[in-house]
Image (cartoon, rainbow, N blue to C red):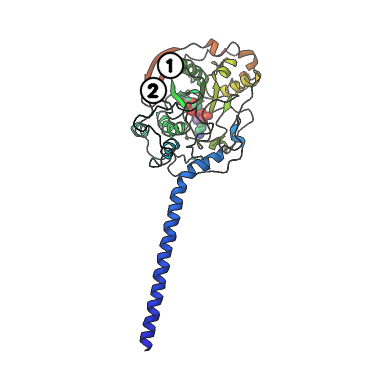
Amino acid sequence: MASTMSRLMLGRTLERICKAVLLLCLVHFLIMMILYFDVYSQRFDIFSRFNNGRGANASRGPHHYYYNYSRPNTTFPSYLPGADQLLPTAKPEANRTRPTPKPIPPCPEVPPGLVGRLLIEFSSQMTMERVQRENPNVTEGGKYTPTDCRPKQKVAIIIPFRHRDHHLKYWLHYLHPILRRQKIDYGIYIINQLGEDTFNRAKLLNVGYTEALKDAEYDCFIFSDVDLIPMDDRNLYHCYDQPRHFAIAMDKFGFRLPYAGYFGGVSGLSKKQFLKINGFPNEYWGWGGEDDDIYNRITLNGMKVSRPDVRIGRYRMIKHERDKHNEPNPQRFNKIQNTKNTMRKDGISSLTYRLASVKKYPLYTNISVEIGKPPPRPIKG
Ligand code: UDH
Ligand code: MN
């Protein structure tokens, strides 16, 4: 009798356990379904929140949504349909067999596919083949145009260059996917200084401006060092109402602006802004000062520098030693006191150089130039 009772009890307990397990499974399934469908809504919901308070001076609004992606440059998984793919299926069209081609809309102020904070590192092996494989939709010469919307500006990205192939691979690896997510219509120009004379960054940038305009009708120019990688894709690489300074919080300066008038690393000017300041100085040979001269040109011509939020304008610089033939320029301190007197004579209006070659590679256009050498130093005494 007692054993029958205990067996009955055991049976009931087991039954209850089974029911509980079944219920748990059901709840689990329900949660999974909710999460699954939520992924779609997230895509719109989260990023629409970026819109709040964003105007021309964009990134000064509140930004609380940071994403730490371990694989930095992955966009949303390709199995998730994009907004453009989702909408038509929700609204079935009458004429399914012959869809009328829709005019593409202008690109939204805030691109919907941004991921925010990125993980940037330089320890993994990088090869040009790999970067090429990662970016099949970049066309010859390093160009890209969004296909689902019309960008307002056409952007030339100009990089001063000599003997930095190792850095270039990382730059291309990180920047192509970022620019694509940002819906930028762009071309990449590497301005390579031939020979071993003293390096001249600003003069190379002037050459870049001139040569890019021979290639296409650009209306915005972004000048970037080859070793600077943005850590947040909300730092949008286009031009603004005022000349833009992008690299405001570099790791090497403790993620802060080193001084109020700093304009180095990565900056951007519209064609109009660039011409207003007569381009950049050609007479800064060796390291330093040219960026301060550009800053002076901007303020002396009644413009102001626009900057992103300090949490967004973060950059990593690939660590390196000082290059040969780019020693600090001892004349730089004197020269930056004189911008007011020199800027009308020295600039894009006085630029001379000898173009050696223009080569279009899959991920960038290489422009090799001879830009001369510094004038002989006056003999002391
Ligand atoms: N650049 C070259 N080749 C050169 C010199 C400069 O490509 O030989 C370009 C390159 O795009 C570089 C930019 O010019 O990113 C600016 O030069 P830089 O990177 O040398 O300037 P930065 O202020 O370095 O980063 C200062 C040298 C500090 C070395 C400290 C070592 N501990
Ligand atoms: Mn550097």
Q: Categorize mark 2 by other alpha carbons within 10 Å: few (<14), some (14-19), many (20+).
A: some
Nearer to me, 111 or 35: 35
Query: Of the residues shown, which amino acid type is indicated by label 2?
Result: Gly
Closer to the camera in the image, 358 or 67: 67
172 relative position to 336: left or right: left
Taking depth in this image into account, of 182 and 164 the one nearest to the observer is 182
* Residue 26 in sight in this render: yes
Residue annotated with mark 1? 215
Report helix, strand or loop for mark 2: loop
Which residue is at 52% across, 43% downward? 45
Q: For this view, does 33 lie left or right of residue 301? A: left
Q: Position of residue 122 (x, y in %)?
A: 43, 38
Give the class, few, some or many, for how many residues have Cα within 10 Å of label 1's Cα (few <14, many ≥20): few
Mark 1 touches mark 2? (CB < 8 Å): yes
Quadrant for residue 359, please give it: top left
- Residue 324 shows up from this direction: no
Please tell me whether mark 1 sits on a helix, a strand or a loop.
helix
Determine whether, in the image, residue 218 is placed left or right of residue 132.
right
Q: How far across and down, in percent of the image, does residue 248 sit?
A: 57, 33
**Circle on res. 141:** 2
Q: Residue at x 49, y 37 (%)?
A: 114
Q: State the image coordinates of residue 65 (x, y, percent, origin top left).
A: 55, 43
Residue 361 lies, with reference to residue 235, above or below; the image says above
Which residue is located at x 53 percent, y 43 percent?
Answer: 66
Of the 4 image quadrants, the one containing the C terminus is: top right
The numbered disc on residue 296 is: none
Percent x, y of residue 51: 57, 37
Judge by depth and name the residue closer to the eye, 203 or 309.
309
- Which residue ends up furthest to the bottom in the rendered image? 1
Q: Earlier in the sequence, mark 1 or mark 2?
A: 2
Using the numbered discs, state the Cα–Cα distance from disc 1 to disc 2 in whole angstroms: 10 Å
At label 1, the amino acid type is Asp
